[in-house]
Image: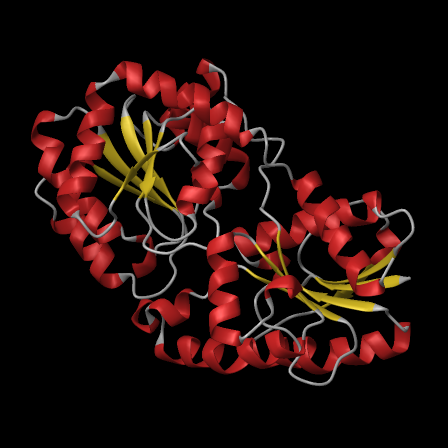
Amino acid sequence: MLVLLNGLQAGNRSGTGRYTIELARWLPELAHNLDFAILWPKDVPHPQRRRDAFLLRRVGGPFRRIYLDQIALRAEQKRLRANIVHYPANIGNLGDIHNQVITVHDLSFLHNPRWFRFGRARYYSYAVRPGLRQAKRVIVDSEATKADVCEWAGAPQDGVDVIPLGVGEDLQPAPDETQARIRAKYNLPKSFFLFLGTIEPRKNILRLVQAWSQIAEGCPYDLVVAGRAGWKTRPILRAMAQAPHARRIHGLGFVDEADLPALLSSATVFVWPSLCEGFGLPPLEAMACGTPVLTANASSLPETVGDAALQVDPTDVDAIAHGMQRLANDANLRAALVAKGLERAATFTWRRTAERTIETYYKVLNL
């Protein structure tokens, strides 16, 4: 039995890219009675397990990507006689493709299209629904996304599998000397609030900056905003530059993956008041590095963090500010959240994600 995995999202510097890479790393090792062929971007290093399984292609621009997703992959399925085709990034094949599995991470473009570029929101609205209707099974990261998928696309409850994401084995508390080196590299103070994620409206950075500005006068913690630029970033960057204490806001841009464990470990508090998430991987990764977390009480995030994080209303600037102030002032609360966070993060592994994905394949194949 052969599974064809569409790995073209591996070059995406986001949670979707990480998910794709981890599936490609773990699936061939764990599914001993399944073979894998993985369509992979030629310019992205691939896992060194089962090198023969990777079909390398140059991705190029958006039209080339659509061609690979919709036409080339269908041709590969026929050539290889693959029993299953797995699309791990929301959009499946719009044609009549046999035994298609689609992973949907979130439907945030439905909750608020204004969070996205107009063309992107329109494309998602057009492309996601046909794939879901044709999929043999759908994988989602959370019960919140399952509810969206079943309500919006009419997917049957028993045709959707909830499979949480995992935390990388490299994400663990960094030694003090490593933390000191990372602070020196990025010119950071010893104590700071950290946001890490794509710079885009959905991440709620505008309200985060407003909340921090309310407490900055009496709080010694600076605000660090790290992550690649997404879309509609200009108002966010303007707010950071014009804030009353702008000199204490550090915009790092994209951070090398090798630096993430030390950066997350160095933060005094990790802040993630996102308005809508299909899972919310960064808060878990911060927990795994021994950092207390403040996050939103919305969408999938309560499922992900449980009682191991301080949850606030992400639409209420005062609530975000109060939560930040509370964590800044209460060392006992921070210590309690660190202990709970380490314990909770340890239960989410990429190996388990891959094992449960294989169970989905078995359901499709009636094994």
Answer with left or right where residue 272 lies relative to residue 350.
left
Could you say which is closer to the camera, residue 238 or residue 271? Answer: 271
Q: Position of residue 58 (x, y in %)?
A: 69, 69
Q: Is residue 309 above or below residue 315?
A: above
Q: In which image quadrant can residue 52 be found?
A: bottom right
- Residue pictured at 86% horizontal, 70% vertical: 82
- Residue pictured at 78% horizontal, 60% vertical: 363
Residue 106 seen from this side: no
Answer with left or right where residue 85 lies relative to residue 215.
right
Answer with left or right where residue 362 lies relative to residue 289.
right
Answer with left or right where residue 133 lies relative to residue 189.
right
Specify the farthest residue to the bottom.
95
Q: Is residue 37 above or below residue 249?
A: below
Residue 212 seen from this side: yes
Q: Position of residue 86 (x, y in %)?
A: 72, 65
Could you say which is closer to the camera, residue 22 or residue 40? Answer: 22
Q: Is residue 55 above or below residue 350?
A: below
Could you say which is closer to the camera, residue 303 or residue 104? Answer: 303
Q: In which image quadrant can residue 121 be found?
A: bottom left
Q: Position of residue 12 (x, y in %)?
A: 55, 58
Q: Please state, as top left, top right, bottom left or bottom right, where the C terminus lies in the image.
A: bottom right
Q: Please state, as top left, top right, bottom left or bottom right, where the N terminus lies in the image.
A: bottom right
Q: Is residue 302 above or below residue 360?
A: above
- Residue pictured at 23% horizontal, 56% vertical: 236
Q: Position of residue 155 (x, y in %)?
A: 58, 71
- Residue pictured at 50% horizontal, 21% vertical: 174
